[in-house]
Amino acid sequence: MASLDNADSQVYDSVKTYYGKVLASSKDLKTSACTAASRPPAKIMSIISQIPDAVTSKFYGCGNPIPLGIDGKDVLDLGSGSGRDCYIAAALVGANGSVTGIDMTDEQLETARENISEYADTLGYQPQMRFLTGYIEMIQEAGVPDESVDICISNCVVNLSPNKKLVLEGVYKALRAGGEFYFSDVYADSQLDEKVRTHDVLLGECIGGALFVDEFEDMAKNIGFATPHVLSATHIQIHDDELLQLVGQTKFYSITYRLFKPNHIPLDITADQQVAAVTYHGGIEGSEEKYVFDADNVFEKNVSAIVAVDTAALMAQSWVAGFFTFKSLAAQGTVAKQATPTAVLMQRAFEESMACGSSSSCCPPKSAESSGCCPPKKTESSGCCPPKKTESSGCCPPKKPTESSGCCPPKKPTESSGCSTLEVLNTDNDKKCC
C-alpha cells in the first residue's frame, strides 16, 4: 500500500480532526465507547498513577488491552495516541524490552514524545520506547520490520481504519510466530448503514467504523490467525439523542480479543485426544494466584484444568507457554468446557448493562458528580478509575452496592460481571469496576 485513495484520505482527515482538534480531553466524548474500560488490574493501576498527567488526560480507549507477564518482550501499539498504553507497557517490559507506538495524529504524538524523559526519571531507567508517525494500515512503511514483535496491542483504534483487513495483515506480518494481537475495539451486532459509517462524529467516537463481529472473526482466521479468543465484552451506550436515532436498533460492544499467530512447533498434544490438562505455575506479577486466558478459561495456580486440546495447543505454542505445563489426556468421558460463542457473551453484556441502568462505562459521562459512582475529578486519567482512593470513593463501592448509588444493581452481583462489563481481569483481588 504505497498511497491512500481519496475515500481513505477523507476518513483519516475526519479522524485526525476529531482527535487532534475537536477533543480537548475525554470529557468531550458523546458515547461511552472510548471510555468503556473497566478497572485495570492493580499492577497496571499502580503504573498509571506514575504516568505524567499530560499523557493520561488525552487517553481515549475502550478496554484494558495490555497483558501482564511481558517482561523483556517487544511490544507494538497501534494508534498509540498520547502514549498512555505505551507508557504502561514500557514499565511492564522493563529495561530489556521495547515498546513502539504508531499514530497519525501530530498533536497526540507530540504529547507522547515530550514526556518520555520525565517518565524515565520515574522508572529509574531509560525505556526503549519510540513513537512513529504513520498509518496503522502501513506499519511496515512506518518502520516496523516483519517478525519483530512479540505482542501487538491496540485500544479502540482498529475501528477507525477504513481498511481493517490491511491492518490485520500488517500485524500478522509484524508478529513473531507464537506472538499475539491483544486488543480492545468496538464491534456491532449487525451490518451498519452507510449513513452511520460516514458520520464524522460516529467515526470519531469509534461507532461508525465498528465491524460486524462475525465479519471480523472470519477476516482474522482467513488472514492466518488462530481462532479468536474473547477475554471480555462490554455493551456501549450512546448518550446523544441524535446519534441514537442514526444507529437505530444496532447494538455496539467493546470486545477485548486475543489473536495468536500460530507457531507450528512439534507438541506432545494431539488433536485426536480432544482434551488436555493445563497447569498454571504462577510467575506473572499481578496474576500470581490465577491467570485468565479468556472468558472461558481461568487457571488457578498449581491446579490442573481440563482444556480443549486446540486451546491447549495454542497456548503451548505461544508466548505464555513458559508459565504453564501441558499434558494430553485420552478423552475417556472427560469433556472440556466448550467456548462460549461471542454472540452469547455480547447478549450477557447487554443484559447486564440494562440492569445497571446508568452507563456501560465505568464512570458515566453525565451527572457523575451526583451519581455516587465516580469522583468528579480526573476520572479520565485512568481510562476507568482514578489511581488513588478507588477502594472508598472511586468507581466502585467496596461493599453492597445500593439502589441509590447510580452505579450497580443491588441484587446478585456476580463473579462474571463488573456493572455492565463481562470481564474477568488478570488480578488476584477480583476487584471489578463495580
Image: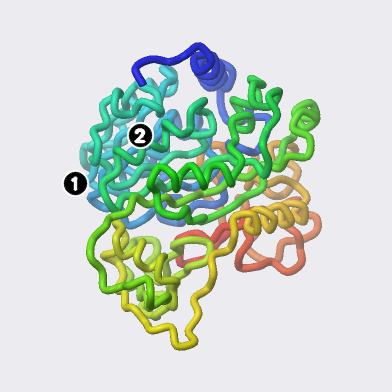
Rendered location of residue 136, percent (x, y): 40, 28
Mark with earlier residue (2, 1): 1
**Disc 2 versus disc 1: distance between alpha carbons?**
25 Å
Outermost residue toward the top? Answer: 6
Q: Quadrant of residue 307?
A: bottom left
Residue 359 sits above or below residue 401 on the image: above
Tag of residue 170: 2
Residue 276 vertical position relative to residue 100 in the rendered view, above or below: below
Residue 410, horizontal then vertical, whole percent: 76, 63
- Residue depicted at x 54% and y 69%: 338
Q: Nearer the viewer, residue 319 or 94?
A: 319
Q: Where on the picture, by quarter, is residue 419?
A: bottom right
Who's the residue at 23% across and 61% down the image?
265
Q: Is residue 210 left or right of residue 30?
A: left
- The quadrant the C terminus occupies is bottom right
Looking at the rendered structure, the kind of residue marked 2 is Gly
- Residue at 54% from the left image edge and 52% from the top image edge: 39
Secondary structure state at the residue bearing disc 1: loop
Task: Say which residue label 1 marks.
Answer: 96
